[in-house]
Amino acid sequence: MRFWIIFLGIFSIMALSNAPVPLLPEIDPNVQIQSFIFSAYFLGAVIATLPAGFLTERFDIRALIRYSLLISAVTGFCMFFFPTPSVFFIARIIEGVFAGIFVTATLTIINRQKNHISLSGTYMALLNAGLLSGLIITGVVSSVTGDDYPGLLLFAILCSLSCLFTRLIHDDWLPAITQSDPVSSHSEIIQLIRDEWPLWSSVIVILGITGVVQSLYGAYTNDSPLVLGTKLALMNIATIIASLIAPRIPLRPLRMIRVSAILSAFALILIPFSAIMIPVIGLIAGIAYIAQMGYLAGTIQRTGLAMGMLTTMSYLGMMTFPALGGIIANQYSIPVSFLVFSGVCLVIAIVIGRCRCTYQL
């Protein structure tokens, strides 16, 4: 597989990012603190992803990928050796910064290839396989050893090994380095936000609600790390399947996004009554994300900037929605929190029709 180094890297960095999720009730019993620790990773990612879009056009992408994996590994070692809520919060912010750079840089490489649609499907499948492994393996290791944290050590080591392999990245994968005008780039960002705001809204919401489920479901059920990790892993299994199938579905991207938003609204309402809705939301999110990437690939010329914006918006949703969900759940209840975000999904189903390329509906 020609891009195996990139695929190994995304698997490793995502596995480490999700490894703390089954441990949230063990790290701190307060649901609001749990949601803040969960969201801290995405705060870092939001800070980094848009600047990363510029970095990929100005600097050596191979170096960006290498140092992202290295520093992510360091945060994993820190969480393993110093497992306190404050260390987890700070480490996950730092990890999020460099994971955001990694995702933007590698997606830029993927989207510059001729077969970018099929590569995007494989990339998203491996991304979610990493998230899946972070949940399940952390829970299994915790159950076997009687210690909550060895899974963090395992994935930190895997990130370190992936970092070593980045020296094998092919030169012909890398885009030419350009020196873009900062003023011009700033104007392009504003125009991109203004022209495509319905799309960015759909990314924030559909990706954000997966974070709401991941951060709150454990507090709702009080499951053990193994059981919780297994349940939440079903979401990632479904997303893997969706990522592999969606590129082969001949549907218009905006139509897929609208249907995904409507289905997400109903799934959120039903989650407190049936765990089967967890993989349903994962399936929906996977299809929607491939559709969002497909829309951008067909309409935006500067792929580095576009992928930076896409990852920024996805991480923005994963940062803000779980934190807001924790606040609502703490004030009212977890089912009420799910109900609120269900209504937001229905709003997105309406506004997505205001995208510039409405012919895709």
Image: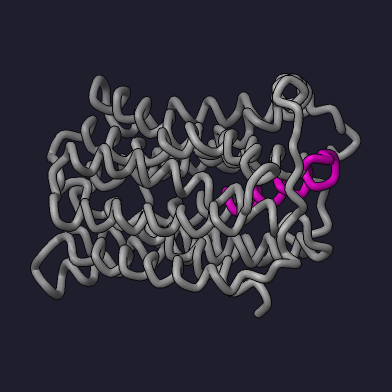
Q: At 26% across and 22% down in the image, what residue appears?
A: 332
Residue found at the very far right of the displayed protein: 359
Q: Magenta stretch?
A: 285-302
- Secondary structure mostly seen in magenta is helix
In this orientation, which residue lies closer to the viewer: 357 or 15? 15
Q: At 47% across and 59% down in the image, what residue appears?
A: 236
Q: Within the image, what quadrant is residue 192 found in?
A: top right
Quadrant in the picture for the N terminus: bottom right
Left or right: 176 as drawn, with respect to 121: right
Residue 256 seen in the figure: no
Left or right: 35 as drawn, with respect to 149: right
x and y, in percent, of residue 46 in the image: 49, 34
Q: How many marks?
A: 0
Q: In the displayed structure, would residue 316 be above or below residue 176?
A: above
Quadrant in the picture for the C terminus: top right
x and y, in percent, of residue 172 in the image: 75, 67
Q: Within the magenta stretch, is there residue 296?
A: yes
Q: In the displayed structure, would residue 271 be above or below residue 197?
A: below
In this orientation, which residue lies closer to the viewer: 328 or 56? 56
Q: In the displayed structure, would residue 348 be above or below residue 39?
A: above
Q: Within the image, what quadrant is residue 224 found in?
A: bottom left
